[in-house]
Amino acid sequence: QQPYQQPQYGQPQYQQQPYQQQYGQPYQQQPYGQPQPQYQQQPYTQPYGQQQQFTEAPSYQQPPPQNYEQLVPKKEERFKQGQYKDVWAAILFVLVTLGFAGVSYLGLNALKNLRVGNGNNTGINIKPADIAGVLVTAVVVGLIATTLYFIAMMRFAGKLIITTMVLSVLMNLAFALLMLFYGGFIPGIVLLVLTAIYAWAMWSWRHRIPFARLMLKTVTGIAKKYPATMFTGFIGLLVGALVAAWWISTIIGLAVWNEQNRPSNSNPNSSSSNGTMYALSVFCVFWFYWASSVVTNSVHLIVSGVFATYYFMGVSNGQSVDVPVSNPTVQSAKRAMTYSFGSNCYGSLLIAIIQTLKSLANQAKNDSAQDGNAGLAILFCCLQCLLQMLGDILEYFNKYAFAQVAIYGKDYCAAAKDTWELCKSKGIDAIINDNFVGTVLGFGGFFCGILTAAISFAYLAAAQYNVKDGSNTVLYIIVVLIGFFIGIAEFSIVASVIDSGVTTTFVCLAEDPAALARTKPELYQEVQKVYPNVVLGF
């Protein structure tokens, strides 16, 4: 009759009164002013009228986590400033970047003195006006397609999740049948089995769709309220493109520099002539992975800070949510680029090391295959796959760890430790939710890329470039690829913001559902209605 009395939880666990210590006044006056033996009255749920949930939620069959107080910091510790975290990693990143700048000087200086042809033998003939027209058309179409898909995510989140799930299964099935049709029996059967497993998983998780729909709808609404998050994603995309252009120019310049400085009587394939070039190339690859990860995670930290500010500080007035911060995006950017920059560099360093090792394993695999050493080729192939899986796991883990950094200003190790505790209790929920949202975002990028590529093709055809003329084949391929990548790049801005927002909102909700109940009770009740275990199970 009284399932939450001492025989089930035990007296020692509730003498600590963790909510009274963590949240202070809102839960100290009435709910926790009761003597401990009267816990069966369920004081925590009285303000929200959800007494029946405690008798039905299966997650309360187990005691609460022993390290709950460490996992949920006090409210005054959020958005912490004044303490620089992981300074050594930031200093190391600056030093490595300066080293790359020195190497880049050698390459770019050699590239500057390189003489190239007049370009008349490329086989590509297109007017400058048409080049500008194709680029402008691709950018405009990509922007329109991205906007329409964003509106669809806001208004038809649930239908979009179901549609993309079905399309994903059908596309995988079509690829598997195509492989079988052309004689690829082994990969076709493997893909067919994986498609069946994926379809079964989607069907088994269908009861989680309402929660994913609510998350996607809520996050897109917040992103609309703060368009500066989209501008942050655009800046990140632009900086990432500049980093890639700098790196490509440096690699090409290093090859030219190596040719210019090799003695005329030396063997081009000797280890003495290639050793320096190999070491410089590995260093440049490592810097590129590190710098790209830092740029991407900087955007994630800034956007996560904005969504966390909305979650903890935004108060519902019945019609809208008021946030007592003048410009949360600017405040979040200050924390991300100063106090938390070292933590960003630390987590990104781990990713860069794994990705560099994976590139080396891939190169060793190719060299072994060319030399006819099948054993080494298989060994390095397995090593590459292992590093790929390890890198993917770490990137996914870092996404939640950096949300902790953005919210609480923790150092990377502390954020990783708390993220691991979160994964042990809510990891499956996070994976399922990310799967649904990720499928929607993935199809959004594919839709924008295909539409932009098609319009670019149509523009070129309308500009009197004969499609049937074989001399224009390369031109059409290049234009279609450029249009496709422009569409994907534009949608990636929205996708990065939505992905960061979903991750941060899930972390906030899993760690502190009471904050949502205090500030936005309507949304809290919606979450309880569609998926109460997210609120009650932690």
Image (tube, grey):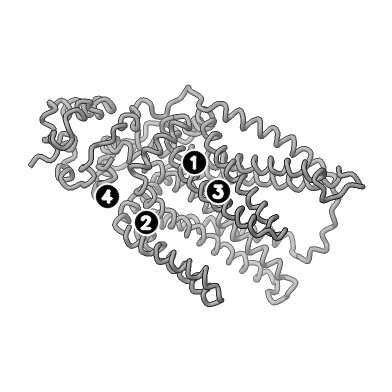
Foreground mark, 2 or 1? 1
How far apart are the alpha carbons under marks 3 and 1?
24 Å
Label 2 vs 4, first from the N-terminus: 2
Label 3 vs 4, first from the N-terminus: 3
Neighbor class of circle 2 (other Cα within 10 Å; few <14, some 14-19, many 20+) is many
Q: Residue furthest left?
A: 1
Relative to the observer, which residue lies in front, 535 or 453? 535
Foreground mark, 3 or 1? 3
Which image quarter: residue 38? Answer: top left
Which of the numbered marks, if any, corresponds to residue 300? Answer: 1
Label 2 vs 1, first from the N-terminus: 2
> Which amino acid type is marked by label 2?
Ala
How far apart are the alpha carbons under marks 2 and 1?
22 Å
Quadrant where the N terminus is found in the figure: top left
Can you identify the residue that label 2 sits on?
157
Neighbor class of circle 1 (other Cα within 10 Å; few <14, some 14-19, many 20+) is many
Q: Look at the numbered discs 3 and 4 and tell me whether their residues touch, using CB distance below 8 Å.
A: no
> Which amino acid type is marked by label 4?
Tyr
Quick check: 231 left or right of 106?
left
Quick check: 107 left or right of 158?
right
Can you identify the residue that label 3 sits on?
387
Q: Is residue 270 above or below residue 92?
A: below
Relative to the observer, which residue lies in front, 315 or 336? 336
SS type, badge 2? helix
> Which amino acid type is marked by label 1?
His
Can you identify the residue that label 4 sits on?
531
